Image: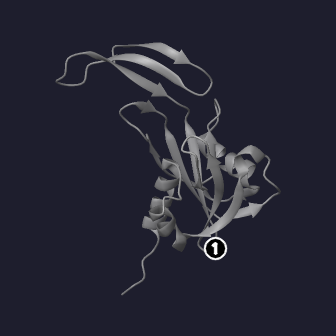
Amino acid sequence: MHGSRPVYENRWVNLDLVEVEPPGVERFEHHVVRLHHVAITAVIDEQQRVLMLWRYRFVPQQWGWELPGGIVDEGENAATTAARETEEETGWRPTNVEHVVTYQPMIGMVDSPHEIFVARGAVKVGEPTDIEEAGTIAWVPLADIPALMAEGKLMGSGTLVALLHVLASRPTAAP
């Protein structure tokens, strides 16, 4: 990258015009959307259920299941964010929070690091404190996840990446 200038900025989204010169390509300008760094948590209980939120999202104008998560505050560790957001949105405090992957959901145009965590267990500590984000809280059996995915009922790349990781990591039964 040879330079960058802001085109639009607010607390949720920034749009920059950057000058780039990828290997073997002439220098050109490209728009880059810069969003927040986020942390998302799949909390799994001893009954092989995942803690999820049934929410309405106005951008796609649909209801769907999501994992708890949110913006990593300035100076905050992403694992701390993962635990904090889970507790604020669900009233459950996750235990044994483990980082599994960091990825960019739209690598060619959007800069928004997504950190995925898995927690094994949670303790109910009260009601959600972030009512706007809470929606309906439920423990969804992992066995139901493939059907929910096929029906388009799982929303957001963080939810999909985390749940695909959990499903792929499950021990398989011996033949």
Residue type at tag 1: Glu
Q: Residue at x 72, y 51 (%)?
A: 134
Q: Which residue is mark 1?
A: 46
Residue 62, how many percent across, how many down?
58, 50
Q: Can residue 37 be seen from the camera position used here?
A: yes
Position of residue 68 relative to residue 109, above or below, is below
Quarter of the figure with the N terminus? top left
Q: Quadrant of residue 80?
A: top right
Q: Residue at x 67, y 59 (%)?
A: 95
Residue 164 placement, left or right of 140: left
| Figure colour scheme | one colour
Q: Residue furthest front?
A: 61
Residue 142, how many percent across, how many down?
54, 70
How would you rate the neighbour count of disc 1 (Cα within 10 Å): few for under 14, some for 14-19, many for 20 or more? few
Residue 106 placement, left or right of 73: left
Q: Residue at x 68, y 51 (%)?
A: 86
Position of residue 105 relative to residue 139, above or below, is above
Residue 126, how many percent across, how many down?
83, 57
- The residue nearer to you, when weighing 13 against 78, is 13
Q: Residue furthest bottom?
A: 175
Q: Residue furthest right?
A: 126
Q: Residue at x 50, y 42 (%)?
A: 114
